Amino acid sequence: MAELSQQLLKPENYQVDTRPLCQGMPFVLTDAAHPRLALKHGSHFLILDQLGQIPACNTLGYGYYRQDTRHLSQWELTLNDIPLSLLSSDIKRGYSGGFLYTNPLTGDIPPQKLTVRRQVTLGHLLWEKVTIENFGREAYDVELQMKFHCDFADMFEVRGLNREQRGERMLPQSSADEQKLFLAYRGVDGMMLETIIEFFGCKPNKIVDGAAIFQLHLPVHQPIELELCVDTVWGGHSLSADQPKQGFQISQAAIDDEYSHWLSQLTSITTENQLVNLSLERCFNDIFILRQSTPKGFGLAAGIPWYCTIFGRDSAIAGLQILPFMPEIARECIEILAAYQGEQTNTYTAEQPGRIMHEIRFGEMARAHEIPHIPYYGTIDATELWLLLFCEYIKWTGDLEFAKHLWPAVKLAFVWLDQTLETGNGYLRYQQVDKHELENQGWKDSSDSIMYADGKLAKPPIAVCEAQAYLYAAYREVAKVAVLLGHKTMAKQLEAAADSLKARFRRDFWMESQKYICLALDGENKQADVISSNAGHCLFTDILEYDKAQAVADKLMESGLHSGWGVRTLSGNAIAFSPISYHNGSVWLHDNAIIGQGMRRMGRTEDTKKILHGILDVSFNYPDNRLPELFCGFDRIGSYGPVSYPVSCSPQAWAAGSLLQMIKTCINFQPDAVNNCIRIVEPTLPEWLGKLTIKGLTVGKAKIDLAFDTSNGSTVCQILRKSGNVRIIVET
């Protein structure tokens, strides 16, 4: 703390900046398609434009963020007040990046005589190293400017919400030795937020109104280096836990070592298809950078940039997707959601005892209770999904002590579920009670996402089909854990509840004329009879009879729903269909992976492989093989790639997890760690994948290595190594 206290300005030394922010422009998020480069580690992340910079007063979300707060809203480099020309960039590592620039015609300096290399890394602190080199035939004198500005906007402001009152933004200040730049803001809650930029090596000649100015003499072939470090401070305390400032190189090596060590603890997956391997590597890397700290532990952020925080539904689904290969990350997801489980009744936040949260935020608007995300609990399906993740974790680990530890939270979850069923006439229903709440609280939570076939919006309270199916599966799976823990009476009650729900669901949600499941029931039990992808989520739960499930699967793979790239959220034949709508015609990767799991459960292996192929094709068509949150639902035509959705998150947790989910689905693992056993039932992988090798798969306390080889439509499993007490049963 001594080092930090020495580098801080006293609050009384700041002066309020009375100039209008960005010439008085309102906060507005432009949803036009635009290139976006993302870097993240822990609780901070960078969103850069295609040139690797943060342009001033941008409406595209560019910035440096920490804890839902934009700590830099401008970060631009110029030579002689002229922008640089980008030659190349590399952000493959996800937590660090490199950018190489040259000069256009810069005063009397001919073009392409100078290079500026920027290296950025996000460890505990944000570090940048800048190297300038002259490749001309004579020495040049240049002025390098680094322009910094900070609006300290809450993420909800960045997304376009204009508040009635903001705090006080301070005038930029510099230290007496011109080595530090201080940007500050006092929030409406009285919290002083600071962004401190410290320069090392070559130091600025002066700092003027947030611009660090370097007067440089550049001899031929004699590079000049400078470094800077960005620290974020709230209420006098660094959000980086007062990390020592040891320089760019040490910081880069530390985060590289952290990633390598993390990766070495996980199950590895490789194939003979190098493109597939690149996609798998990207998925693992995305999960690493999306790990997010909170005051109650680690979890997975949903997606960058808009949802870089813990969500209940997203965490539970991503945990289910990655569990066999990253059990510790899945456990973190279980624990963090349990830590924030509802304890009391609060109308503003929609908290109720036992309910799993929807979303938590830590920015100024949450601290001032201008938004209910402290956390906000308005989700109808996170509780059931959390229960499913808990049960799946026990299957893979056999950790009954962990199950006993969380059993009170499990029982409390059923208290909320039972109460919700009682008020919902036998179904899990939601309705917007407070104006701050979401209108729709299933995974399609846009205000226009639940409708009838005629395009009119369904009337609340609404019971979406997939929430009921998740609950049915949760009844069945928790009953099995209850038996293991000796709670046989509870197990019987859960089984009976499952049977009752299944009978009601078949009666009320089935559309005989369409041979399909309706999207939802409205407040009068009228069917929202549009054809959507939601019905596909019911397939893996076995809530439908065989013939009805097959009819649903048939329709999902027809051209109305399947675009050629994947299953659309809404049929192309629906009145409300739009391929560029967030939930009414787009294609989501996690949606497809859940549907793919259902197809495999029903024995439809060719459809399962088609969905896997589609997910990989999307990966091959995106930069760095990164899977996006969603893309537009246009038909696949000729050589055109998938059409990007304008403001899709990338990376995104359940998009990254979708490929891992499809790999485990095709292999068809059936773990039973309590009995030291794992069954692999009729594995079916596509032949074009080549040999697939899995090393370090953990079942209970045992580890196994497996190889799968496919030829002539048949997949053979080979056991390469086994350590620990586990039986491996392969059924073909």
Image (cartoon, rainbow, N blue to C red):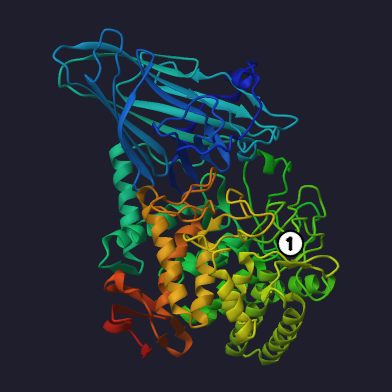
> Would residue 464 be visible to someone looking at this image?
yes
The answer to whether 588 appears left or right of 730 in the picture is right
Q: Residues within 10 Å of mark 1 (few under 14, many from 20)?
A: some
Q: Position of residue 528 (x, y in %)?
A: 75, 65
Residue 188 sits in which quadrant?
Answer: top right
The answer to whether 356 appears left or right of 305 in the picture is right
Mark 1, secondary structure of its residue:
loop
Q: Position of residue 395 (x, y in %)?
A: 50, 81
Residue 529 sits in which quadrant?
Answer: bottom right
The answer to whether 205 appears left or right of 184 in the picture is left
- What residue sits right under mark 1 in the picture? 453
Foreground: 672 or 253? 672
Q: Is residue 120 above or below residue 259?
A: above
Instruction: Please state the total of marks drawn on the protein image.
Output: 1
| Residue at 45 percent of width and 83 percent of height | 671
Q: Position of residue 681 (x, y in %)?
A: 42, 86
> Would residue 331 be visible to someone looking at this image?
no
Q: Is residue 338 above or below residue 75?
A: below
Foreground: 240 or 641? 641
| Residue at 69 percent of width and 77 percent of height | 411
Q: Is residue 619 above or below residue 681?
A: above
Q: Specify the amino acid type for callout 1.
A: Ala
Q: Position of residue 358 (x, y in %)?
A: 66, 57
| Residue at 62 percent of width and 63 percent of height | 339
| Residue at 17 percent of width and 15 percent of height | 219
- The C terminus - image quarter: bottom left
Which residue lies most toward the top here? 108
